[in-house]
Amino acid sequence: MSVKIGSTRRQRRTSSLLVNSVLILLVLIWSIPTFGLLVSSFRTKEDIQSSGWWKMLPHREWVQVEEFKTKDLDPNSVMTIEGVSGTFKEFRAGVESPDGTRVRWVGNKRRGRIQVEKRQWTMRDDFTLENYNEVLLGGSVNIKRADGTVKAVHGEDLSDAFLNSLAVSVPATIIPILIAAFAAYGFAWMKFPGRRALFILVIAMLVVPLQIALVPILRDYVKLDLNGTFLAVWLAHTGFGLALATYLLFNYISSLPRDILESAFIDGASHFTIFIRLILPLSVPALASFAIFQFLWVWNDYLVALIFIGEKKEVKVLTMRLADLVGSRGSDWHLLTAGAFVSMILPLAVFFGLQRYFVRGLLAGSVKG
Amino acid sequence: MASVSYEHIYKRFSGDVIAVNDLTLDVQDKEFMVFVGPSGCGKSTSLRLLAGLEEISEGVIKIGDRIVNDVPPKDRDIAMVFQSYALYPHMSVYDNMAFGLKLRKMPKSEIDDKVKDAAETLGISSLLDRKPKALSGGQRQRVAVGRAIVRHPQVFLLDEPLSNLDAKLRVETRANLSRLHQQLETTFIYVTHDQVEAMTMATRIAVLKDGILQQVASPQMLYDHPDNVFVAGFIGSPSMNFFDATLVEQPDTGKMVVDSGSFRLEIPAHQTSDLQPYKGQQIIFGIRPEDIHSAELTPPGVIPARLSATVDVTELMGNEIFVYGLTGSKPFIARVDPRTQVRPGDDIEFNVNMANMHIFDPKTELGIL
């Protein structure tokens, strides 16, 4: 018996070890490049081009301690410099002496430039905020370079795009959630003829792919003169988000304890009061989790924005500006990384702000568990 | 302050499930009526029909003189305590209790008075700021009752309010509820599957089985004179012993005897006249465990009728012994004096108090005596 218990415990430990190491691996795979992106966005253009972002971590590097010129050596034979000897080829690559220094011949044979280097702990910590200035601000921006010179450049104006994205995402998140919550409550708790059929119809809408509807909707928008407005994108996202939202919220709302609603009925609450005073507060975890999904989807959306907003500069969203940036400044990594982080910062904030709703159930304590 | 009457109530659920079958019952004003029965007997459904949470398929329910069939729950002037308590999890105890009053647009100061009064009555004044999840089971139960009494309804409906409490708390709360009933002088309708709760609290008990009302009577009446085999077996713990037997008239003495094959018990002279029509017929003979005494420790006043049996199992309860015996091959339970010397396997003599016997018709299962 005891052997059995021991072996199951060992099994459990092994499996949890396995799970944990896979999780750690996944976290590393996801977070290391992101971290690298973040670090790069704060490095100067020259730094990015000359060394990798990991150089900001403490590491040992050959650092020059002495440099001199000499004409006394014959580079075509074996030479002895600073107590080490080697051929010209070897000195070009660097010859290490037993005391830890390295002697290197820099340049061609004729110049006779010798560098003595030592291994030292260093880190690159010359970070700058100028990249963000350059991508965020519009018009002419004075950018201070690493060497101290100030240069006027044309800013990429992502802050405008950021606000546009916000203006698209927030209503495009709230509107479908509100409508879907009402619908979900109706489907879950109100009795009316055709309830089942209607619900099935709504759920069936899930199979309609967004791409199929783009052209017809675009034609209607053109007729209605809605094209290129925020309203157009709100409506599109609302329409495409509603089916899933209704379905998810229905699942949650219909699982709320019946007793609570009945108790409210006896207390004198109408359907509307119950919805506002009970369903909404109790559904916060479901609302929050769907809000995260919808917000991320709308924020990261490119296709819908591209089609319904188009090239109008004043309403262009962040994803589109970012795509432009890749086209026009494709080799300027310092700008691309900064731009990428500007587009990531809000989704990250939203996720960390609302993530506790994934974890904590709000129903604890209402009914005997 | 109202009576309640069910008049030929039927409740059919989809399909042919009949939950309540021709229920006719008058609950008098200020009465503590308990609906009791095994699960699925329709007792909760009957209560929910009265509350307006289920629609009546057929029949009329009146509260006072008003027919309430089509009156919504909130206008029936009732309050209900649910088995799960159904507290609003996101509201404080105070708000839970005030919710119904707020919805009725009562002035704030009046709400405050009423909530505090009710909290005082139930001893939960110190808990008013807490959320339900911070309360113990007993406290939640009291809050649920408090939420019902603040509104001073005409009828209180309680749906198994004690079943989620532990045994000790249940006994305590039982007494508190009885006290509350006396204090409030209101009609209580209480649903339970626990016959002990029914016996201890009820003014009258309605026993239901399979949606059919079996008997309505005061607890004592129900115990002493059950109408049928089901009620006789349901009320009382351990439950009544039943034997298939024949009524026989002894040719020599002219006395009536219950003959089960394994025992013959003489019926007291004063009861024989009622049984004359059943002479020679099959009957069901019922006797409660406490009416079977050990032969040597029979209390005075019992006209002894001897029953010999083999002891199968004994359970010492302290104040009595439950003896599981076998007469012939038929099992029965006796509650005997704790000083009785019995051991499993013994053959001993019992005295049956025939004055408290019950005789039922085996075909209709209705009581004859």
Image: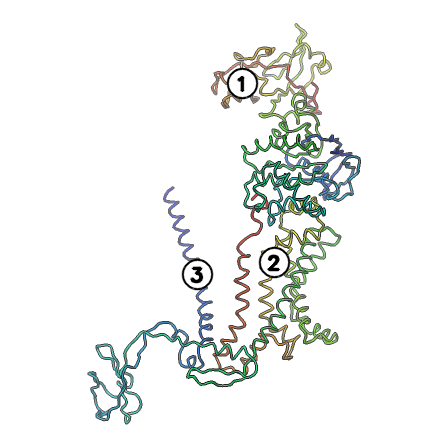
Question: Pointer 3 and pointer 1: residues touching (CB < 8 Å)?
Answer: no
Q: Which mark is residue A283?
A: none
State the image coordinates of residue A128 (x, y, percent, origin top left). 45, 77
Residues beneath discs 1 and 2 located on the same chain: no
Chain of the residue where label 3 is placed in the rendered structure: A
Asked if the residue under mark 3 is in contact with the one under mark 2, i.e. CB atoms within 8 Å, the reply is: no
Dot 2 or dot 3: first in sequence order is 3
Quadrant (top left/top right/bottom left/bottom right) for the C terminus of chain B: top right
Q: Quadrant of residue B46?
A: top right
Residue B336, label in figure: 1
x, y percent for residue B103: 70, 48
Residue under circle 2?
A: A287
The chain ID associated with circle 2 is: A
> What residue would you read off at disc 3?
A22
What is the tally of numbered marks visible in this picture?
3
Question: Could you tell me the amino acid type at mark 3?
Answer: Val
Disc 2 packing (10 Å; few <14; some 14–19; many ≥20): many
x then y, percent, for residue A324: 57, 80
